[in-house]
Image (spheres, helix red, strand yellow):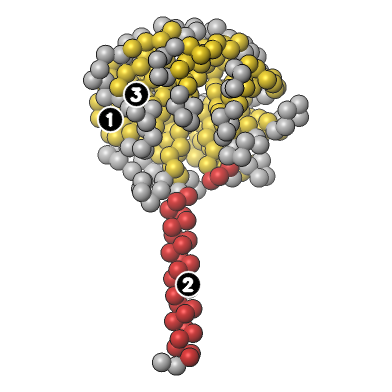
Amino acid sequence: MSMRCLRSLAVFAMVLALGLMDRGASAAAAERIYVLSQTGATLSEIEDGAEATSGAIALDKAPAALAIAPDGSRAYVTHPDLGAVSIVDLAKKSVLRTLKVGGSPFGVAIARDGRLFVADWNGSHVSVLDADGNEPAKTVEVGRAPAHLLLSPDEKLLFVANRESDSVSVIRTDDLTAAATVPVGHAPFAIALSPDARSLYVGNVQGGTVSRIDTTTFKVADVMQSGAMPYGAAVVGDGSRVLVTNQQSGTIAVLGAAGAPPAHVKVGSYPEGIVIVAGGARCYVANWFSDTVSVVDLASLKEIRRIKVPGGPRGLAVLHETPERPSP
């Protein structure tokens, strides 16, 4: 075989390898955003980078909040008006079954061991049940109007934003006892953890502030101004910035170093849920009154796209796809 042929084969092999690497990297980096629409009663799907939704799953009326199972197979959706939680099969794009939990279920979190945590907005407690509803529920008392829930990465702690008690409950998940009750600002609703889980950011809806709780001491370490009615929160992967949706002003606030004034990015009307994708390159924002999802470039801090979705989008969740866990 001639040297020219050998060089051609080598070049072809290199191009093929680079192509395979590129496809592997794309597969590893692909993300899907799930959009919960309240008035539209649907769970829609957007592939990161797409111009439109790729499908919608019909739900019972007035869904409020969602959580995706750690293995990415299911979504759990609360219905406060029905006292129920829908279990959605993301691969089959259908509701598997409905759990009757009673009360007014709102915030929801699902653990790797299969336990489902559901906040009762009117009951001042969190119900704990297995993800299929086959065992009797346990309850743990928290503050009034518990809103969103968040598990720590090791799932040893559950954080609960108590909107009408102006506090955050910290619950030990092993024995369901209270580790702390932390006073925060007025009407806490959204919560987000830093990547190292040492800081919990709490959006205080009626205070226009964000409280930062030190999770090693369970005390408020900082209070930052965000804007009118902070309803959603997310933290970029390196922990350098916190993004907060300001419902009343139709913006997201980008909070950086403590004491620095926030930057603001205009999005749709009444933004609520927010998620960060692509390693912190972009965020998606659910615009409740606009029936859209805004896509914001976080390098330029500009809205680059709006995607039409079913009516009343309020909650978002992101599913990171890997070769071991392909898209639904």
Q: What residue is drawn where x is 58% and y is 39%?
A: 237
Please say if 182 is above or below 256: above
Tell me whether circle 2 and circle 1 mark residues in contact (CB < 8 Å): no
> In the rendered image, which residue does mark 2 sit on?
15
Please say if 240 is above or below 120: below
Front label number (2 vs 1):
2
Residue lying at the far right in this picture: please name it. Answer: 260
Q: Which residue type carries mark 3? A: Arg
Split into 4 quadrants, where in the image is the N terminus? bottom left
If you read the primary sequence from the N terminus, does the residue marked by circle 2 or circle 3 appear first? 2
If you read the primary sequence from the N terminus, does the residue marked by circle 2 or circle 1 appear first? 2
Q: Which residue type carries mark 2? A: Val
- Separation of residues labelled 1 and 3 (CA atoms): 19 Å
Q: What residue is drawn where x is 76% and y is 29%?
A: 260
Question: Which numbered tag is attached to residue 115?
Answer: 3
Q: What residue is drawn where x is 53% and y is 42%?
A: 277
